[in-house]
Amino acid sequence: MTRMTQADFDEDGRLLFAGPCDFIFASVSVKDLPPAGAPEIAFAGRSNVGKSSLLNALTNRKTLARVSHTPGRTQQLNFFSLAGASGGDEKLRLVDMPGYGYAAVGKEKIAGWSKLMRDYLRGRAQLARVFVLIDARRGVKPVDDEMFDLLDQAAVSYQVILTKHDEVKLAERSLVVEETLAALRKRPAAYPELIFTSSQTGEGVSTLRAAIARLLHERKS
């Protein structure tokens, strides 16, 4: 088997996200999840962390995921299907999870979202990784630690993406990365590398695509 290089993963990631990407399903309960299909990559994060903007940048779309200035708008698991640049068979599914940590939402609704995420994380065999988005201007907050706890308990591999790279001063970026890595060192299910992104400038987006391509390759091996 030919050994893949970083350049190979860069190109595979580019091609993967160059093709069709369509919304296919919305689930409000674990009972109505779509049938098992391609590997799934889920995206989680606090409300207004920039999750929808990153999904749009990742897929080269402007409106794939709805961008809202009103926290708490994503209230279900939204599934998107990628066929890759060549079309044809489904290659990957992206899953947009409900934003967490928005205090103005009623406790009953928060409990419902939490159960939905917990049930999905524990029972989805094709879930390859969860990317947890952290606002680089804010750092890891207690509500993020709660999400890390949930992922550790579910034994689901997860990786942190720092967002809003363009809004962090150059001199502060290394410190943000170090503090975030320090928060993850004792986390058993955390992948030990960060990706620093900006949906506005495109910083880190190709790196994220390549990381997903590498993950899919490893899953096949």
Image: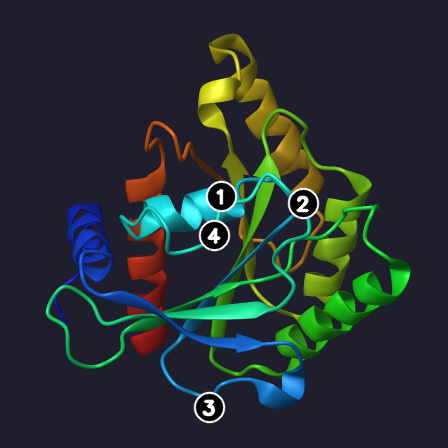
Which residue: 81% across, 61% down?
Answer: 110
The residue at which mark 2 appears reads as: 71
Which of discs 1 and 4 lies nearer the camera? The answer is 4
The residue at which mark 4 appears reads as: 66
Q: SS class of the residue under badge 3? A: loop
Which mark identifies residue 148?
A: none
Residue 221 in sight: no
Contact check, label 2 and label 3, Cβ < 8 Å: no
Which residue: 45% across, 88% down?
Answer: 36
State how far apart marks 4 and 3 are (Cα). Answer: 24 Å
Mark 1 neighbour density, 10 Å: few (under 14) some (14–19) many (20 or more):
few
The residue at which mark 3 appears reads as: 35
Q: Quadrant of the C terminus?
A: bottom left
* Identity of the residue furthest to the top in this view: 171
Which of discs 4 and 3 lies nearer the camera? The answer is 4
* Left or right of residue 80, residue 108 in this image: right
Q: Residue 89: name its quadrant.
A: bottom left
Q: Residue 69: name its quadrant.
A: top right
State how far apart marks 4 and 2 are (Cα). Answer: 12 Å
Q: Earlier in the sequence, mark 1 or mark 4?
A: 4
Query: How far from the left and from the top, in percent, is residue 77?
Result: 57, 69
The amino acid at mark 4 is Arg
> From what the image shows, is residue 119 above or below residue 142?
below
Query: How far from the left and from the top, in percent, is residue 144?
Result: 73, 46
* Left or right of residue 75, residue 86 in this image: left
> From what the image shows, is residue 129 above or below residue 187?
below
Q: Quadrant of the N terminus?
A: bottom left
The amino acid at mark 3 is Pro
